[in-house]
Structures are given as C-alpha cells and as structure tokens.
Image (cartoon, rainbow, N blue to C red):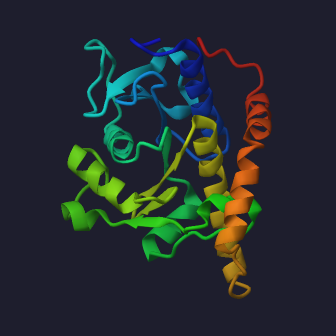
Amino acid sequence: MGMNVPEQLGRELALANRILYDHQIVDGLGHVSVRHPDDPELFLLSANRAPGLVRPADIVCYRLDGSSLDPQAPRPYLERFIHSEIYRARPDVHAVVHSHSMSVIPFACTRTPLRPMFHMAGFLGQGSAHFEIREAGGDTDMLVSSPYLGQALARSLGSHSCVLMRGHGSTVVGTHLRQAVYRAIYAEVNAKLQLSTQALGEPAYLNLEEARLSSETNDGQISRSWDLWVGRLGELDLAA
C-alpha cells in the first residue's frame, strides 16, 4: 500500500472500485477517490489501473495539486484533477466517483438534467448540474486533465451531488465513500428509468421535500447495500 494510506480505507477503496465495475458503472476506465481521514488536503486514489483490477497496493495518496506524496508512486490517472479540484472547492465532499455509465450520457449531451424518479435517487432532488468543457477549454480531447479544467468542473458542480459532462460522462460526490458509490450506481439506475418513462409521458418526479426525506432515510441504509455489493464479488483476493 502506498505512503500514508490507512490500511482499512485503502482496502475499502479497492472494494469500491470492484463494486463499481461489477455494476457496470465503470469498465476499463473511470475512477473513485476518498479524502484522507486525517488531512483534508490529501486524498486517496488508485494509480492508473482498470477499476476492476484495483488492489489496496495500487492506492496512492495525493495532494490537492494532483501530485503524489510518494515520488516513486506509479503512473497516475490523467483525470486526477477531477478529484483534487472538487475536494479543494467543496470541504463537505469526502468521496468522488467519475464514470462513463451509458444511460447518463444522453442527458449530458442534451443538457437534460437527471431528476429523481424514485426514492432511491432522492440525492438528485436539486437535479444534476451540467459541465460544458468547450466553455472552459475550447476544443479538447474531453478529458479533465489539468487543474484549470478541474476547477471549471468544480464550479459547474456547485452545490449539486452530480454533474453531467457533455460528450464524456458524469461525476458524483458524497460525504463518505459508500455514499458516493451508492450515488453513482443509482444515478445510472435513475437515468435508465427517466429515459424509459419519458417515452410514456412527462414523469412525476419527487419534489424537493420528498427527495430530501428519501435521501436522509436512504443514507441510513447504505451499509446494507454495501454488504450485499461486497458479497456479490465472491471470494476476492485483493492482494492478487
């Protein structure tokens, strides 16, 4: 495990990567991070590795400028600035998931916000934010691969829990790692439901108070889902 990576949290972050892969939120690409519990100016993120293969040994501790504490750390993700700049802008955020889950992309490309279809997506009560990379960087490869673009993404996220990224994917945030994983999974589920329901007519979305109450209740149940998701992985040798 990398320098200054708490053992239990490093293992949980490796599990978070595997869970997101198991739910097809990430594939060979995408990433999840968590703020360091002892220093808010640091965060933990895997080295450049497919999420479904991440082990505790791959977890690296980064500063908010995107540099590693360990000068010998392996190659980092290009888009680690998604994480660093959101942590810098949002002290309340303690975990970040960036993914390219398929059902979310049509919403990002049409500026149609995700809105809560059901109680499991109450965290979308404000709707999703939208990030247009052209407004910040002109024509790019669509990757948030610099502090400047990370800052632009963080501004677009604002106080929301989810930001859709045109031509790219989405980023969700949470107050802890399990919550961010939950939100990434249910943002995709909600997108599927919203797409299918809109073919029938205008959905009756949760209102703000319904969304708030649902989100508060769900937050108390996340560990139950987490245990199931870990169980789905079966016998897993995280040292492999």
Q: Nearer the viewer, residue 25 or 203?
A: 203
Q: Residue at x 55, y 63 (%)?
A: 104
Q: Residue at x 32, y 44 (%)?
A: 85
Any part of residue 55 in sight: no
Compared with 8, 105 (above or below) is below
Q: Nearer the viewer, residue 125 or 82?
A: 125
Give coordinates of residue 175: x percent, y percent.
55, 42
227 lies left or right of 109? right
Quadrant containing the C terminus in the rendered view: top right
Q: Residue 196 lies in what quarter of the image?
A: bottom right
Give coordinates of residue 82: x percent, y percent.
36, 45
Q: Residue at x 70, y 73 (%)?
A: 206
Give coordinates of residue 94: x percent, y percent.
49, 38
Any part of residue 234 in sight: yes
Compared with 74, 130 (above or below) is below
Q: Residue at x 75, y 36 (%)?
A: 223
Give coordinates of residue 145: x percent, y percent.
27, 44
